[in-house]
Amino acid sequence: MLGALILALAALCAGQSADLSLPFVQPQSCPSSHYYDVSALKCSACPPHLRRSADGLGCICKVGYTMVDTGSPIAVCSLCSRDNQVVSVDGRLCLTCPNCKQCGGSLVQVENLALRTASCQACTNQTVPNALGNMCVPCHETFIWTTNSCTCPSNNLRGGLCFENTRIPASSGSMPDSIWYEMHLQASYLACANTQYSNQTACQLLTNLVLLDVNGLVSGEALILYRNVPAMTNYLPKLFYVDTNIAASLGQTAPKGLSFQKDSQIILKIVKYDARGNFLGWEDVRGGTLQLCPDTQTLLDAAYKFGSFYAQSCTIRVSDLLQRFPEPVLYELFLHYKDNQGQSKVWPVPVRSLNLDRNGLGAGAVRRFFLVDGLTGRKGSLSNPPSSVSYAKDLVLRTYLPTGSPTSEPPFLLTVRYAQAQDLQEQAQVTFGVQYEMNQAARKRDTDIALGVLGSLAVFTAMLETSSWRRRSGLEFIDVVTIVKYLAYFAGALSNTFFLVTYGTGVYWLIAYKGQQSTVEIILPPAGSEIETGFIIYVSCAFALKALQLIHIMMVQMTVSIFLIDWEKPKGRQLPKPAENKPSPSSVSIWRTYFIANEWNEIQTKRKINPILQLILILLLLEVIGIKNIARRDLNLNLHPGSDVNLAPWSPILRYGISISMWLAVGLAQTFFFVGICERFVEDKIKQFVDLCSLSNVSVFILLHRCYGFYIHGRSVHGQADIGMETMYLNLKKEEENLCAMRGLEPNMEVQTFEVLLSNKVRQQYDRILSPLNEVARRNHGGHVDSPTMQQNLKAYFTMNKFLSSFLEHAYKDMDYVVREKLFLERILDFEFQRSDDRSFFYNDERMLFSNVLYYGHELVLLLFDALLFSVVDLGTQDFVLAAIITYLLQKILETVREAISRRNLATKTLVDERFLI
């Protein structure tokens, strides 16, 4: 006994690991001596004394043989060998009939099945006249076998059949309030479970009743009866792959070597059964076979193009669904393919009902499904309208890659979610989709590693920038401001981390998915997956942190300390001495200072690219040329798909990758054109500003931080700049012919721009002089020139001008400075190694780093901010045009705010009346 049990378990395990694929055979392809076995879906040979039935689904007796039909596809036959014997009308018995040749006209062949005789007389109690009245028709076999007559006691009558034993298993399962279940549930069970009948159609009907009970699929009476059918019943269809786990029941989940080429079609076939359990044949899955939404054949067929995500949704009136499906049709889905030997095979596709998941019963997989059922919702009579209609609300075919290597996941899985409608005029929302999945654990791991590594670098970068800021601010201890600064720098560095990871992810999927040329092995993360959701979160974080970085930069730029040093000396005779406590009036013109202040104000928001041109070119590439169509969830690279082509859903990852790539490409092209060509050969506003300072004899002293800033040396080599046109031309000619000194701060040097690292002593003196200037500037908005506060203001201005000019001429030995070159590492790290405790440092700046006080010096930050803003809006709206409009509006708002506050700050710090800033 134990040995037999072990052998049975071994056989069971061996059966689970076998390939479930079977040759694809249709009924009409069976030879004339074979019938089509609907249970095994194959051709089987008929015994020698039998022939194939008209429908090809069974074997019937040849002429001269009696036939007993119990529902089995193979009839039981016996030869009628005597001369006076005839086969009964039902073909079951050999009857002795001396005068049957006389039957005809008003006489019918009346058969006495008990005596096995026949005569031309009235019908017996085991037969009934047929509808035409020309012959006696035998009762159903169940009546004769049970009562030996055409009558049956009510206790033995079930579904129009008569059973000797109507006992069914006791159950507490629920049964729908349906006339269809009342008529057929118990009868189908009794006819299927009774080995005397082995009624195949009844077994099919019982299986259908289990599936049609959507709400009781796992606890209904139909399922309980199905599970109580004896195992020896040969014709009971397999309903479940397994109760809780798909992969465990499938064993090898897919044929080895199954692969699909780019643009190939998924060939699916279905086996159809009507509600009564009758086999309706095979059918190719194409167009609207499984899709309830109407559309053109081309667009419907696009669902089965391998590698292309597909989604179709519509609203249909329930009565229209019933008109298309008056009675439910049940399906079994198969994948049609050819094995390595070229043999045509089909592989069963598991069907997972999401209604089971909703009930907390896991991923149970069944073999059959239906689209619309208005039959089981009828009460009282089948002619009554249904009180409820069940329909497939969501039907999704999921493909798991790689299909060629069997894994724990089936390569194809159909998921269905059923819903019920109580009103025939109700609008039903139905969806059909095709999705693709693959194991994305490696990609998620790579993303996490990249975030960890780059995030660590961001921490150290922010620490270095904060340390540099503390040294440039002359701070010794860590305070609250230092912590805030660190967070601001860290926000910028972390934003770059998120940007690099998300952009790298977008480009990877563009190349890996869209670049597949032959076999499809890589698929995009499905919509709503963990990877896609995380990606959108990372993009949002990158934008939010980049916005904080830009706000921090703007706040620093809008509060910068700036002073315009006028080197012009008075000429001619002195003006009359003013009243006491008033500074002596100067004969030096202020218009040169106003001119430099206006030029500085104009370049505050100058950028290396043209933002409007950037947006126009981006829309031209994405919308007009059609590059945006590459971002769809299919393998097509067609930039202009036709109207008859199905448009796959958008992929946020691909849209982001394409939009950022286009933004960076156009931005880099603009930068190369404007900086590399226009500024070199046409006009360079930044260098022109330095030249204007020299022509105006005005220097610009800028402090970005407390002890760090920039100096633009604008002292004229000719001594004076308040001169006439002729003298100006002569001075310029002298410079062209090298007949005068160089413009640099140091003798025989051309360098006019410097990074400045001041000592604390210089900064303290600077603040001491500037304090009354700031206070007066805050109070004087439209005040009179001769007011006492303005006189104090003028005195502070002249004092500051005198101090800075003397400082630059090395007049203060205790506040001296040295000019030097920055070390290579200092340039790379943007960090000064030497401390400015006892003297200041001027670092030669040939890179025009004073543009860091302007938009111009932070073009990369602005470019990434605009790109991220554009992408975030697009991810939320999936509209590039709207994203461009919102990006432009926000650009103008920030630019307006930046100009307004910087204009006021410039007037406050330089004593240039704001009314002269045009």
Image (tube, rainbow, N blue to C red):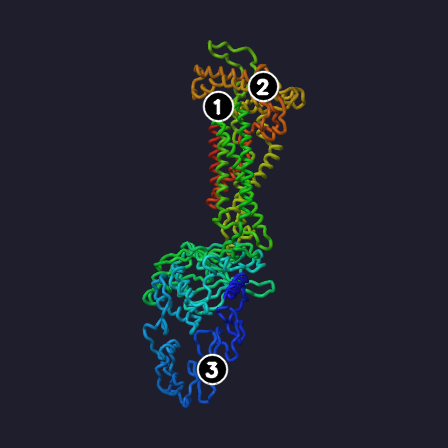
Sequence order check, earlier mark of 3 and 1: 3
2 vs 1, front mark: 2
Looking at the image, residue 118 lies above or below residue 520: below
The residue beneath circle 1 is 907
Q: Residue at position x 50%, y 64% from top?
A: 2
Asked if residue 581 lies left or right of residue 710, the reply is left
Q: On residue 839, which mark appears?
A: 2
- In percent of width and height, residue 28 lies at 52, 72
User: Looking at the image, is mark 2 or mark 3 earlier in the sequence?
Assistant: 3
SS at circle 3: strand
Front position in the image: 341 or 880: 341
Name which residue type carries label 1: Ala
C-alpha gap between disc 2 and disc 1: 30 Å
Residue shown at 63% from the left, 29% from the top: 824
Q: Which residue is mark 3?
A: 78
Circle 3 Cα neighbour tier, 10 Å, few/some/many (<14 / 14–19 / ≥20): some
Identify the amino acid type marked 2. Arg
Residue 430 visible from this viewpoint: no
